Image (cartoon, grey):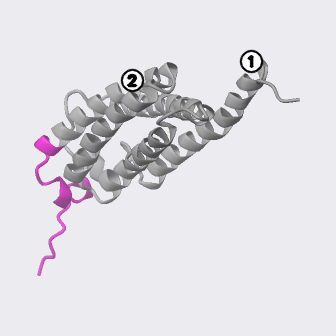
Amino acid sequence: MAGLASQSQLRMSFLRYALVTVPAVLLLGSLSGALSNAGYGNPWFAALQQPALMPPGWVFGLAWTILYVMLGLSLAMVLHAKGARRRNRALALFALQLLLNFAWSPVFFVWQRADIALSIVAAMLVGTFALIVVVWRIRVVAGLLLYPYLAWLMFAGLLNYQIVALNPDAATLAPGGASTDIRL
């Protein structure tokens, strides 16, 4: 007997997606930061002149945890919307967005290229706006879940821009203010 799924079955189907997407996005985001030695414990970052708006380190951990959970839930809603027009486009935009997001920490903290990281943030802003437009047409709530992420990216972009402006030699700055020049 073929029939439509009940509300309970639909809810369970969404929960199965969310039980994979939320931990996966949270884990990958956390790994990107941890493997890049992101944050105030990074000697290169500590040597930079910080913008006046720079929040304490714990704010970043809390904000990104909440944002990754919201991204994972939004992704689960899109995955759950089987047969929706533009679903494949939304999934491609999600993949691109997450790749850019996870690439930012290594570029900034490992390669110490605040200028290139700023370009990544700009691409993430454009990508997030496009993602919201596409996802909104699939599930409004999934689109709404992306607005805090967009707002945080704007703030992160401002911080990244200020770091570039305050530290024009950031790419050549050695941790702790030591010189990288070899003395003869």
Q: Residue furthest right?
A: 1
Q: Nearer the viewer, residue 53 or 155?
A: 155
Residue at which label 1 appears: 7
Q: Relative to 55, is 168 above or below?
A: below
Point out the image quarter for the N terminus: top right
Residue 176 magenta: yes
Q: Earlier in the sequence, mark 1 or mark 2?
A: 1
Q: Relative to 168, is 1 above or below?
A: above
Q: Tell me where residue 22 sits by quadrant.
A: top right
Q: Is residue 43 visible?
A: no
Q: Are marks 1 and 2 in contact (CB under 8 Å)?
A: no
Residue at horizontal 40 percent and vertical 23 percent from the top: 148
Residue at horizontal 72 percent and vertical 24 percent from the top: 10
Secondary-structure class at tag 1: helix
What type is the residue that disc 2 sits on? Answer: Tyr
Q: Is residue 20 visible?
A: yes
Residue at horizontal 51 percent and vertical 19 percent from the top: 141
Q: CA distance from mark 1 to mark 2?
A: 27 Å
What percent of the width, then of the height, locates residue 111? 30, 60
Q: Nearer the viewer, residue 40 or 8?
A: 8
Q: Nearer the viewer, residue 115 or 170?
A: 115
What percent of the width, then of the height, locates residue 179? 17, 64
Q: Is residue 50 left or right of residue 10?
A: left
Residue at horizontal 47 percent and vertical 55 percent from the top: 35
What percent of the width, then of the height, locates residue 18? 64, 33
Q: Relative to 108, is 153 above or below?
A: above
Q: Nearer the viewer, residue 104 or 145?
A: 145
Secondary-structure class at tag 2: helix
- Segment tinted magenta in the rendering: 164-184
Q: Is residue 12 left or right of residue 66?
A: right
